[in-house]
Image (cartoon, helix red, strand yellow):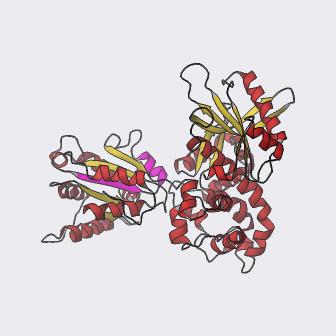
Amino acid sequence: MQKPVDMFDRDREWSALVRFAADEQPGATLGVVSGRRRQGKSFLLESLCQELGGFYFSAQEATDAESLALIGEALTRHLDPAIPFTPSNWPTVIDVLLRIGRDHPVPIVIDEFPYLARANPSLPSAIQAAYAPRRIERTASRTRLLLCGSAMSFMGGLLSGNAPLRGRASLDLPVNTLDYRLAARFWELTDPRLALMVHAVVGGTPAYRTEMIRYDAPRGLDDFDDWVVRAILSPGSPMFLEARYLLAEEPDLRDGALYHSVLGAIAEGNSGRGGIAGYVGRKSNELSHPLTVLEDAGLIARETDAFRGNRTDFRIREPLLTFYHVMMRPFWPQLMRAGATDRIWQRAKQRFAGNVLGPHFERLCRDWTLHFAEDRFGGWPSQVTAGTVNDPANKTTHEVDVAAVGHADDGKPPLLAIGEAKWGETMGIGHLDRLRRIRDLIAHNGRYDTSRTRLVCYSGSGFTEELLRLGRQGEVDLIGLGDLYG
């Protein structure tokens, strides 16, 4: 089945949904679709139902009785029975949904499923009972029921552990943000520098361009400052409060002040648990729950240090949250005043370069190495993270921005590459010498096979002539913005 012409990318997601919904095998099946808001989940599922003649229902925040009445009205419109369908309980609704698929495969979508489950916590158990393996209503049906939701912590637990629906679903499909290369295409940005700067602000959420700012993209590098002011920092823009709404949409994030403080700590460069605790003013062991909740919500990621296995770093996954905590939250009262936005941006631009663009460039360098470098460094990496290397002789430590580790069939895993990333600095021989020193220290440690480790300089501002010459001689790999977006 052809993908709708107005759907950008999402080829993998569309193919998975079509395979699930058009499966001719007997027996009703269950699928789960999850992802944060504004990624295009509803658009995907509505398009699927339109193409295959399915039934789509989007739940609302309502009482259980009102939700039953609403889905009854929707089914009445869809089925056009002789008398209106007025269900009194969810098992009756589920059996009607199963009967829709008696003659042929048909997709049935319940969007915003967490609203229904919060109003009636027994609903997942009712679906479990309806999908009992030998129940005739299930075996005689080819209904392809899809439960969709944006509350990531809830959806993540729907099929896990001892949850009622564990083992019942034959599809578990996440709809993620667009990666940085797809985001550049979606925003129609051909200048790699401009594409990276825009991505550092709004990330890869499709609706930020289409629904939120109505296709207002910077026309060039000289328009970027004005675009930030008018599209992001202006109190009249829908994007102005979006970062705050990202937390408000997650039902498990009840203590908003604590969670914003944790995100603020990470945005300011405190990636370790101890640094976050010191910033927030809590003991380290008191942060386990908020960090886990933020991770389950898909807002932060937990990364293990490549060279110190007992150290864990936390990174913000949504660029808009980093931008908000670095550039907006400290100046919130001033931003609310009319006419102050442009002056605030001009005075805070240095923070944007150092606290937003620099770390974001490092993140994209790791993403490129993991997903797009392929075997450029002698093999496909199985893991790419940052790391910290001890230097006892000099009584210091070295931060490694990119560490690519390959798969080990036996023996020590190969360290394919280590790299340093600099957004606003022309890189030279000093950076290469530092990487050589770090490689020697790692080799001495003995954890990795460093016999073929490549040294890599990633720069957003270019390289000196001497480093370019060494790059041509194979002493170092030089990766610029053109490579990241190539």
| Quarter of image, res 247 | bottom right
Q: Is residue 82 left or right of residue 120?
A: left
Whether residue 375 is situated above or below residue 46 in the rendered picture = above
Image location (x, y in percent) of residue 132 = 23, 43
Image location (x, y in percent) of residue 54 = 26, 61
Quadrant location, the N terminus: bottom left
Image location (x, y in percent) of residue 212 = 54, 71
For the point 63% across and 50% down, which residue is it?
484
For the point 21% across and 69% down, which residue is it?
76
For the point 75% across and 40% down, which residue is it?
471
- The answer to whether residue 247 of the structure is visible from this angle is no
Q: Residue furthest toward the left? A: 82
- The answer to whether residue 264 of the structure is visible from this angle is yes
Decide whether residue 147 is among the magenta residues. yes
Q: Residue furthest toward the top? A: 411
Q: Which residues are magenta?
A: 143-157
Residue nearest the viewer, comparing 125 with 381: 381
How many badges with numbers are in the image? 0
Q: Residue furthest toward the bottom? A: 338
Residue nearest the viewer, comparing 114 with 39: 39
Q: Is residue 149 left or right of residue 132?
A: right
